Amino acid sequence: MEFGDKPFEFKRTNILIQTERLLLRPISLSDAKVIFKTFTSSVARHMTPKPAQNISETEEFIRNAINAFEEGRDIQLVIEKASEFLGLIGLHSRKGHKTPEIGLWLKEEAWGFGYGYESVLAIIDWARNNIYLDEFVYPVDKKNERSKRIPLRLGAKLISEYKGQRGWAEDLEIEEYRFR
Ligand SMILES: CC(C)(COP(=O)(O)OP(=O)(O)OC[C@H]1O[C@@H](n2cnc3c(N)ncnc32)[C@H](O)[C@@H]1OP(=O)(O)O)[C@@H](O)C(=O)NCCC(=O)NCCS
């Protein structure tokens, strides 16, 4: 996973976002075990990062995420429901410091309950109040119908299409959606 190099302009407070059912909170090293266990090949099927081969890779990812957060280049949050780990959601500055890129995944047992949409709504609401931004970017594999519905429901427009490296088997075909 690559982090951006262009810091967002935002207040570095402890981020805790409460929604109707979920809590979004900063990632920490103590999440390594559950992330290693739940970020499977099936979850990563339409994503660029590959599942970690061993837990030290997951720990390295978390350390990099914390470092990127401290430098304001990335915001990586754990999605929890009643203290149960459901997945991760992030805002990445790869596309520029005013165009946060949204990325998320949920463990397989948590798919299809609206948690993905609820998490995206929560993080964009937080970002609109805390980051100077022009628009959000939502890149998604063409075949990832479930994920694609999220930006479409938010009125996003398809801006560009490009080949991306699939983490697992074949190349991804990325559709890049943008919305304000
Ligand atoms: C993509 C993901 C985050 C979506 O979260 P989710 O909680 O499962 O999705 P939601 O329940 O919020 O549903 C999102 C939309 O997909 C629809 N949907 C649900 N199950 C679906 C299915 N099997 N096929 C197609 N659409 C489906 C929902 O109806 C909803 O659309 P709507 O708002 O128009 O009704 C989650 O499935 C996931 O983690 N997948 C694996 C990792 C991944 O692909 N991440 C995204 C990378 S861009």
Image (cartoon, rainbow, N blue to C red):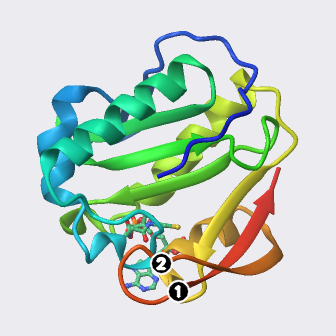
Instruction: Give the residue drawn at x 30%, y 70%.
Output: 43
Residue 96 position by quadrant? top right
Task: Looking at the image, tell me whether mark 2 or mark 1 is earlier in sequence order.
Answer: 2
Q: Is residue 91 left or right of residue 146?
A: right
Residue 177 in the figure: left or right of residue 4: right
State the residue at coordinates (37%, 47%): 88
Q: Quadrant of residue 82?
A: top left
Q: Is residue 65 left or right of residue 85?
A: right
Q: Are marks 2 and 1 in contact (CB under 8 Å)?
A: yes
Q: Which residue is under mark 1?
A: 171
* Residue at 74% in and 32% down: 6
Comparing 106 with 153, the one in front is 106
List x then y, in percent, for residue 128: 74, 32
Q: Which quadrant holds residue 110?
A: bottom left
Does residue 49 appear in this view? yes
Residue at (30% x, 68% y) in the render: 111
Query: Left or right of 174: which side holds 162?
Result: right
Q: Secondary structure at mark 2?
A: loop
Where's residue 180, x and y in %?
A: 82, 50
Q: Which residue is mark 2?
A: 166
